[in-house]
Amino acid sequence: MTKTLMRVFRYAKPYMLYFVLTVVFAALGVALSLAVPIFIGNAVDCCAGRGKVDFDGLKKIVSELAVIVVLSALFQWMMSFCTNKLAFRTVRDLRADVFAKLERVPVKYIDSRTRGELTSRVINDTEIISDGLLQGFTQFFSGVITIIGTLAFMMSINFKIAAVVVMLTPLSFIAASKITKASHDSYMKQSALRGEMVSLAEEMAGNQKLVRSFVYGDRAEERFDKINREYGKIGTKATFFSSMTNPTTRFVNGLIYAAAGFLGAMGAAGFFPFIGVMTVGKLSSFLAYSNQYTKPFNEISGVFAELQNAVASAQRVFDVLDEEEVPDDSDKLVLTDCTGDIKLENVCFSYVPEVKLIEDFCLDVRSGQKVAIVGPTGCGKSTIINLLLRFYDIRSGKISVSGHDVQDITRDSLRSSFGMVLQETWIFTGTVAENIAYGVPGASREEIIAAAKAVYAHGFIKRLPQGYDTIVSENSGLSQGQKQLICIARIMLMDPPMLILDEATSSIDLRTEQRIQKAFAKLMQGRTSFIIAHRLSTIKNSDTILVMKSGSVIEQGSHDELIHRGGFYAELYNSQFAT
Amino acid sequence: MKRLLIYLKNYRKELILGPFFKLLEAVFELIVPVVMAKIIDRGIAFHDRGYIIRMSFLIAGLGACGLGFALTCQYLAAKCAYGFGTELRRDLYKHINSLSFSSIDKAGASTLVNRLTNDTNVVQNGVNMFIRLAVRAPFLVIGAAVMAIMIDAKLSLVMLAAAPLISFVIFIIMRKTVPMYKKAQQKLDRAALLTRENIEGTRVIRAFSRQKEEVERFDKAVDEIAESSEAVGRISAVLNPFAFMVMDLGIVAILWFGGVRIDSGRLTQGELTAFTNYMTQILLALVVLANLIVTFTKAFASANRISEIFALQPEEDGGDPPKKMQSGSSMIEFRNVSFSYETAGDMSLRGISFSIRRGQMLGMIGGTGSGKSTLARLIPCFYKATEGKVLVGGTDVNELDPDELRRSIGIVPQKSVLFSGTLRENMQWRKPQASDDEIISALRTAQAWEFVSKLPDGLDTRVSQGGKNFSGGQKQRLSIARALVGSPDIVILDDSTSALDYATDLALRHALREDMAGTTIVMISQRTTSLKESDLIIVLDDGEAAGIGTHEELVRTCEVYSEIYRSQMNEKEEA
């Protein structure tokens, strides 16, 4: 825990000045505000009664008090100001670092985590660190100063009564921690139930049409009602427990106040000579301190809970930061003038060592050839993409591109020799032009339009509300086919020597589909292409067909060879003619 | 709004008693400074030992009573708020379940989820806070003011000047910062969007070697977050120090003028102490009040949003009394049906007429947006035909009990959605008590039993939310099986075989024909081969039937159909 904490503070190091200033301003602000009751008490003592008011003294005290009040407010404002800067900038750096880290970890790491989980580490966990650790720290610090300060002032006024107050303190602590624990337990239960309720609501109300089609409404209501009632019961309890804190501590504070008042009054009236000299003014400042003294205790126990939360979040963030990175390969060869020849020799690969997947796989593709990858759904066609683009590295064997072992080439230069269009299109939030120019950031508008025209995407783009400047995203209402055309235009503009294409199977209407076919054909001219193929014409026209089943390549050859062989491919092929 | 107040009716007792007890606590709290003043003025001044002891015990006693009252109030508040929230949520969900499809379209699914989970919680919290604070905070402000006026009316002018000043500053700062907080939140949402997109596109980004630019883009986004958070922080940081400063300066003024009043004998020393106490109490109560206003504003906004959902039209109940389906000759019949969605002006379907018998298969083909899915949605009466008549089992669907009608139809949507729970529970959606045999037989027909039988837990396999632990093809087959369980009279497959390869698609069609002989099948597809054996095929083009007939007839007479057929056949001939 301390290690994690230290690491967070290391992130705050560039903002050390703000940190130091926060501490200084907090100390000054709290100290000054604590002096206020003393001055009030002294002022009250100047007004002994009718005709006995010491106006000179009062004037001095009152004007000093005014200055202190203004200064204290100023310091507290500056403290908040510095805390804000410290917290927001540290969290900014942390976020940028985690995000940059995600660009350097192997694809494997990202594949093995859910999107929500990683996003939450970049966005939410860092926020919790800022709230809990940095802002919590200031609260904690001012709390401690307040306790020490009030104690010191109380002792300076009257040591004996102060001792009584200190003795009563655990009362407040015990009460607060007992309640916090009880309310924490039922609060956890409540939030678990709430999570259950929200996910049920998301499933049911989110798929309302399906619920209606299956006449599932009554059963859904029953399930919802059950959780809802339980939530109501636990929620009542949790809310009640947590709302006990304030009145209970108010009560304990009231007792302390009464005790201090009693002792002070008895002392001032002269009944308890052992208490020492006590004036009315001193009593009133003492009472003011005893009131303030108990408050930080509640806050501090709250801060501790938040701190634990924040440390857990920080741990999650650091876990990402400590992930192993893809090794740096900037000293390797930069692939230029790629011919498009690809050779795979005795390649072995599997995602998990125990489950063998690809064994001793050989393939020789010459420049401009087409390789079709076919097989039933879920047969692992994307594995080939993962290996060619080195998202995953092979276990043994050798892959060479343009005569170079891919291990000797920089990943970036290897990847930019490939153009890739996947079935799951990737459109980021931005204009159509930005999306097309993704691979060539400096491309002119003319080049962009030319690329779009070449792949038959210009027509629909022109009809969008703002043409090429229309902001689009994955869910902005473009059809699957249109999104795919944009992705194809992206590759067209980049003009790579090698291609990896995934033909769409999802419901695209005839005209768009024909357009995509034409676009693909155009793209493939003169380029070495790997096509995850669903269309017979594509498959038949390929130079080599890779037939995959449950992760591995089971047959390999030209269409005629494979039909002749009468294996899995032949069976798959013939099924299309059957009705 | 009125609609929601009904749910408070059962909690009248809590609504009255809660604030009442809280008021009592506040009264007691106000008395404490007075008692302390009395101790000073009488106990100390006259050296009255008994008085000091009695009054000290009184303060402790007042505290104990206050605690009792406060806890009673908190309990009543929690009970009332959660009781209210639970009943509201139950009825809201019931209402959502009764909405017509056009109402669901109007609201949108994510809105419904939000209203049901978030907004109800906000209103619930509003009720809780109302009971706890709505009476207490204003009472403390007014009460402290009244007590101060009773002690010394003239001196309380200081207080009356400071309180509005503080309120004004609180108000100004809140009005300025609320939109700024919103803006900062939007920036944060944008960074979250960037992260999500980046993770989704890992492969593309790396394929394009654009990691550096992505990092720069994100850096800019986080810079903006930091900037807007700092901007709002600068202003909101003023609030507390300023409010306390005004209060303390008020106390300074009270001390000075109080001194003058004491000198002239109009005020005692103890009363002056009490006066400063009230000043502090007013400020604290004002801060609470300001937060309370924010809570209420939010609660009212949420309440209005919930009311909007309640105002949406529920579905009509069919004829009165609802008619029954007949075992006549036609299973589904459209008579000159036209339809337009409420939100769209144009007709989505125009003048469609056809009829199909029990056990037959109806095929539908056409481009995106040609109205295939719309036509299918009229059969279970999800939407009512704008013109013409839709008959199922020889009866107008408007006169059938909608639930009864839908129980006889199995629907496979375009997008396969599975629900969290076991596979068995998912398979029992159409028929709640379906036996394992029935389920397995449906899985077999849907070509899903092959992989389900290999799962270590079989039908007890857990399905995660949305069915994420199954592949696209598996999900599609499971969602087909779900619709087949219990052999419905009609099965509608809305382009639901797109993720299946040819061989599986073929096997599915064969199995459907053999295992579901008495079932009328409506199949929407992009592939002419899938529809070839249909008894009737409707070719839709921009909402109109470009051709209706068998495959052979359409190839000869329908230009649109033969064009699609030829282009798909060409591939095969080439092959």
Image (tube, rainbow, N blue to C red):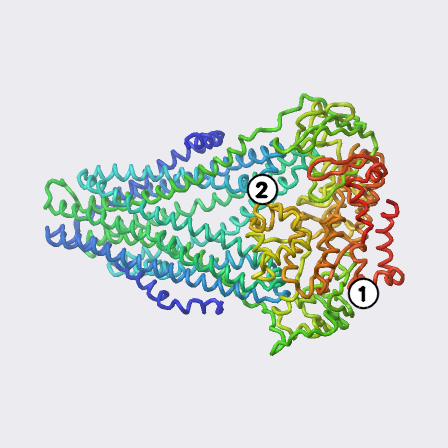
Q: Is residue B147 left or right of residue A351?
A: left
Mark 1 closeness class: few <14, some 14–19, many ≥20 residues within 10 Å: many
Q: Chain of mark 1?
A: B
- Amino acid identity at mark 1: Ala
Residue at image location 87% in from the left, 53% down from the top: B566
Q: From where the camera sits, is residue B108 visible?
A: yes
Q: Is residue A548 above or below residue B242?
A: above
- Amino acid identity at mark 2: Thr
Give the label on residue B545, or none: 1
Q: Is residue A188 above or below residue B557?
A: above
User: Toward the viewer: B108 or B548?
Assistant: B548
Give the label on residue B203, or none: none
Please, what secondary structure does the residue beneath circle 1 have? strand
Give residue B487's position: percent from left, percent from top.
Answer: 66, 62
What residue would you read off at disc 2?
A114
User: Toward the viewer: A545 or A119?
Assistant: A545
Q: Chain of mark 2?
A: A
**Outermost residue toward the right in this view:** B556
User: Toward the viewer: B43 or B182?
Assistant: B182
Give residue A52's position: percent from left, percent from top.
Answer: 16, 49
Q: Is residue A500 left or right of residue A248?
A: right
**Outermost residue toward the front in this view:** B437
